[in-house]
């Protein structure tokens, strides 16, 4: 079995490197399986405070699905492909630890969808984000449309998905698709400071804050007030 995902553990950061640079880190079944295993391991390890996902090489985070593999699948296997990709990305989105996508170069199609499942997307000046599935005659299949609409609104989501427009790093920052731009990517001292800051957050406080921020029905009344009371009690008891 080829190694499509590499793991590097440093300090309290669990780094997942998509390792298919000769094909711009496009994702087939094997990479998805290895990514899923890595995310499970990061979630189960109490020493891990941050999950970082990036692409090998300088050209791409990921250009999405391996189209050659996808086109060779039977209808049944294609259905499995879509469902499994959803389960992997949902696992990342629901991880009760900070998740960071470092977009070094292209994040296209399923690569963008993977980045959207993370809590934070950070890039470099060369980052390019795009959803190009409609150009191939199908739709984003791993949750990208729902997440885009949630993050940037219906109008801009239509520009990304329907017009398949490429978004450069500074436009992505303006729209909120990127939260930071680091000039030298993973080697940037400010990026290390960003990871250190995330690593220093109380795991319980982060878990509770993420649950609240991702709840579209959250209010300031009734049971939600009781949640705040219990959360504060838990923090004070530590």
Image (spheres, grey):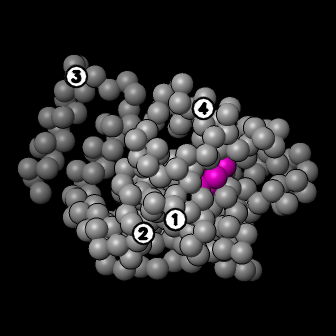
- Whether residue 10 can be seen here: yes
Q: Which numbered marker is on residue 185?
A: 2
Q: Quadrant of residue 18?
A: bottom right
Q: Is residue 178 magenta?
A: no
> Label 3 neighbourhood size at 10 Å, few (<14), some (14-19), many (20+)?
few
Q: Which numbered marker is on residue 220?
A: 3
Q: Which residue is mark 4?
A: 159
Query: What residue span does the magenta drawing correspond to?
Result: 107-112
Q: CA distance from mark 4 to mark 3?
A: 34 Å
Q: CA distance from mark 3 to mark 2?
A: 39 Å
Residue 119: percent from the left, percent from the top?
41, 50
Q: Earlier in the sequence, mark 4 or mark 3?
A: 4
Up-down relation of residue 157 to residue 120 (above or below): above
Q: CA distance from mark 2 to mark 4?
A: 27 Å
Please identify the quadrant where the N terminus is shown.
bottom right
Q: CA distance from mark 1 to mark 3?
A: 39 Å
Write the residue at 13% across / 42% down: 232
Q: Earlier in the sequence, mark 2 or mark 1?
A: 1
Q: Quadrant of residue 57?
A: bottom right
Q: Secondary structure at mark 4?
A: helix
Write the residue at 22% across / 33% down: 227
Taking the image as shown, residue 192 lies to the left or right of residue 174, namely left
Mark 2 touches mark 1? (CB < 8 Å): yes
Residue 158: percent from the left, percent from the top?
61, 29
Residue 179: percent from the left, percent from the top?
37, 50
Write the residue at 46% across / 79% down: 8
């Amino acid at each position: 079995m080829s190694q499509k995902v590499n793991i590097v553990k440093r300090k309290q950061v669990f780094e997942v490197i998509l390792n298919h640079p000769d094909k711009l880190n496009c994702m087939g079944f094997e990479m998805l399986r290895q990514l899923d295993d890595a995310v499970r391991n990061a979630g189960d390890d109490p020493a891990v405070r941050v999950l970082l996902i990036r692409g090998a090489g300088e050209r791409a985070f990921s250009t999405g699905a391996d189209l050659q593999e996808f086109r060779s699948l039977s209808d049944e296997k294609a259905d499995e492909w879509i469902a499994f990709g959803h389960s992997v990305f949902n696992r990342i989105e629901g991880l009760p630890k900070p998740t960071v996508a470092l977009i070094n170069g292209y994040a296209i199609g399923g690569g963008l969808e993977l980045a959207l499942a993370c809590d934070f997307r950070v890039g470099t000046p060369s980052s390019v984000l795009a959803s190009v599935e409609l150009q191939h005659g199908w739709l984003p299949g791993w949750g990208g449309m729902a997440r885009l609409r949630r993050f940037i609104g219906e109008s801009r989501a239509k520009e990304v998905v329907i017009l398949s427009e490429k978004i450069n790093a500074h436009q992505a920052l303006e729209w909120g698709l990127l939260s930071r731009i680091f000039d030298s990517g993973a080697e940037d001292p400010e990026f290390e400071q960003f990871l250190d800051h995330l690593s220093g957050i109380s795991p319980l406080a982060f878990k509770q804050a993420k649950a609240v921020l991702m709840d579209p029905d959250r209010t300031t009344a009734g049971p939600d007030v009781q949640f705040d009371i219990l959360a504060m009690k838990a923090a004070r008891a530590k």
